[in-house]
Amino acid sequence: MAVGRPLALPLYLERPRLLERLPREPGEVLVLEAPFGYGKTVLLAQWSERLKGFRTIWLALLPDDDPKRVLEEALGLPQGSPWRAILADLKERPTVLVLDDLQDPAAVAPLLRDPPLLLGIASRRRLASPEIAALAAQGRLVRLSARDLAFTREEAVRLLGDEQRAGVLWERTGGWPIALHLAAVSGGEPDWASLAEGLRRSLGPELFSELLLFAGVRELPREAATEATERLAEAGLLQAAEGGFRLHAALAEALPLREVRAAVLKNRDRIPPPLYGLALERLGLFEELAALLEVPSGPALAATLPEAVLR
């Protein structure tokens, strides 16, 4: 756990289209829900810096942290203080409280019931609780997802300063903020291996395994989707279309080839044969592709594949 607001450094692009949507009055709550690399902490820092006349309390939570205990420490209150004492302290003067990487909203339910301050929350997962639902119904909640936080093409151009390069990277990354930021800082390609490890830690085994599968097949129809597919789409890592889901090309390139191959082979029963054949060719699994074409349905399958795959 760390206490203290990160600096809103000039090298991070300010995005007025987001900042203008954020709450400004005590009693309102901002929730940012997105995986690793979507600029949640940066946006919270820029937001809190703009709120003049407010005391800022910033709690960067670790997975095992008890948010109440961390908040008690930040306020200088005894451990085990009742929530009414915490809320009274927060109400004494205008306060912005940021809970960066909150795992479970139930841990701060008394704070969410009637927040006496401006509250900003960042999470790598979607947060659901009766208190959050009530805030939304009361018009006191601003909620942004990965789709909102992804860079627009215009923002990518402003960040990179080169319209052609920005357009190419924006298309490849789907507007993934950290990839674009690293490209701007380095002047070259982002470090895809480091970004992949960040996604692994952020998503957890189930969602990362689903992401590996999509890195191999690139797209799946809706009937092949699972709950993990839907959650990746909600997180903005998959593009949802009428017919199914597809992965941004840059994310596919970022993930480890060995693990991508294993995920495709493990999930072959979920993959329509034409997409499976294309994935095998793309991943260099030529023995498996040959075996696929030798089964009784092989000739019919071969007729659906591009000629280049069959050479």
Image: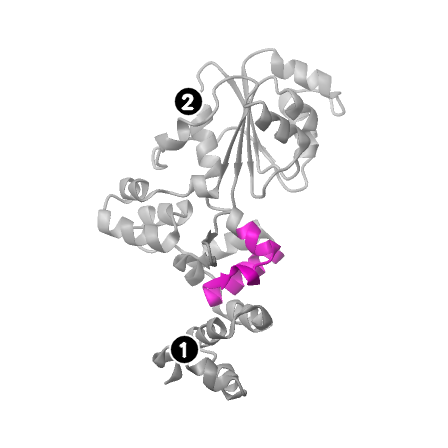
> Residue 86: x percent and y percent?
68, 19
Asked if residue 286 can be seen in this view, the reply is: no
Q: Residue at x 58, y 68 (%)?
A: 270
- Main SS, magenta region, reads helix
* Residue tagged 1: 305
Q: Quadrant of the N terminus?
A: top right
From the top left corner, tell me how far across and down residue 191 is, in percent: 40, 56
Instruction: Pick whichever of labels 2 and 1 is earlier in the sequence.
Output: 2
Q: Secondary structure at mark 2?
A: helix
Q: Amino acid at mark 1?
A: Leu
Considering the image in quadrants, where does the C terminus appear?
Answer: bottom left
154 sits to left or right of 102: left
Q: What residue appears at the point 70 percent right and 33 percent down from the top-left corner?
A: 106
Along the viewing direction, whichever of 250 and 61 lies nearer the viewer? 250
Query: Which span of residues is magenta-colored?
Result: 206-232
Type of the residue with mark 2? Arg
Considering depth in this image, is 279 or 180 the residue closer to the camera?
279
Q: Is residue 185 left or right of residue 236?
A: left
Q: Quickly name the residue at label 2.
A: 50
Q: Secondary structure at mark 1?
A: loop
**Residue visible at 44% across and 16% down?**
52
Say if 299 sits above or below 161 in the image: below
The verdict on residue 218 being magenta is yes
Figure check: 189 above or below 140: below
